[in-house]
Amino acid sequence: MIRLDYISCALTIASTLLVGRKIWYGWLVAAANSVIVCLIGLRTAEFGLVPANVVCILLYANNLASWRVKVPGEEPPEARAITARWF
C-alpha cells in the first residue's frame, strides 16, 4: 500500500524549499501535494481537507501564473532554477 502521508510530507518539504528559493515549479509540487492531501481526506473521511486544498490549488495556479510573467531585463526563471542551490 502506498503511504500517501509520507509522500505528502516529502512534497511539502520540497515545495517549501523550491518556493523559498523562488523556483517557479515549487508551485507545481505544492499543487501535487494538495491533490494528495485531498485523496487522504477522502480515504479517511476527513472531508474538510478537500475544499481547503482545492482552494490551495487555485491559489497555487494564480501564484504560478504571476511568477511566470516575464519582467524586462530579468533572467528567465529556467536560468534561475539551473543555478539555484538546494542548501
Image: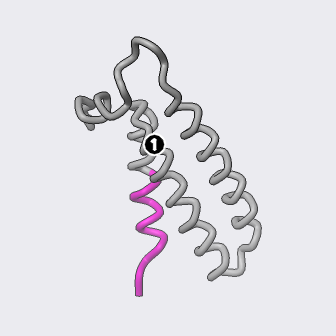
Per the image, the residue denoted by label 1 is 16
Q: Residues within 10 Å of mark 1 (few under 14, many from 20)?
A: some
Q: Quadrant of residue 77?
A: top left
The quadrant in which the N terminus is found is bottom left
| Quarter of the rendering containing residue 48 | bottom right
Q: Secondary structure at mark 1?
A: helix
Q: Is residue 69 left or right of residue 14?
A: right
Instruction: Count up the numbered dots.
Output: 1
Residue at 58% in and 32% down: 66
**Picture residue at 71% right of the left edge, 67% below the top:** 50
- The chief SS type of the magenta part is helix
Does residue 42 lie above or below 61 as drawn?
below
Is residue 36 a member of the stretch shown in magenta? no
* Image spot of residue 8 (x, y percent): 47, 63
Q: Where residue 69 appears, x then y in whole percent?
A: 53, 28
**Which image quarter holds the C terminus?**
top left
Specify the quadrant of the image occupied by residue 45: bottom right
In the displayed structure, 75 sits above or below 9; it is above
Residue 7 drawn above or below residue 24 = below
Of residues 85 and 72, the one drawn nearer to the viewer in this rendering: 72
Magenta stretch: give its range. 1-12
**Amino acid type, label 1:** Thr
Residue 3 percent across, percent down from the top left: 43, 77
Residue at coordinates 67% horizontally, 50% vertically from top-left?
A: 58
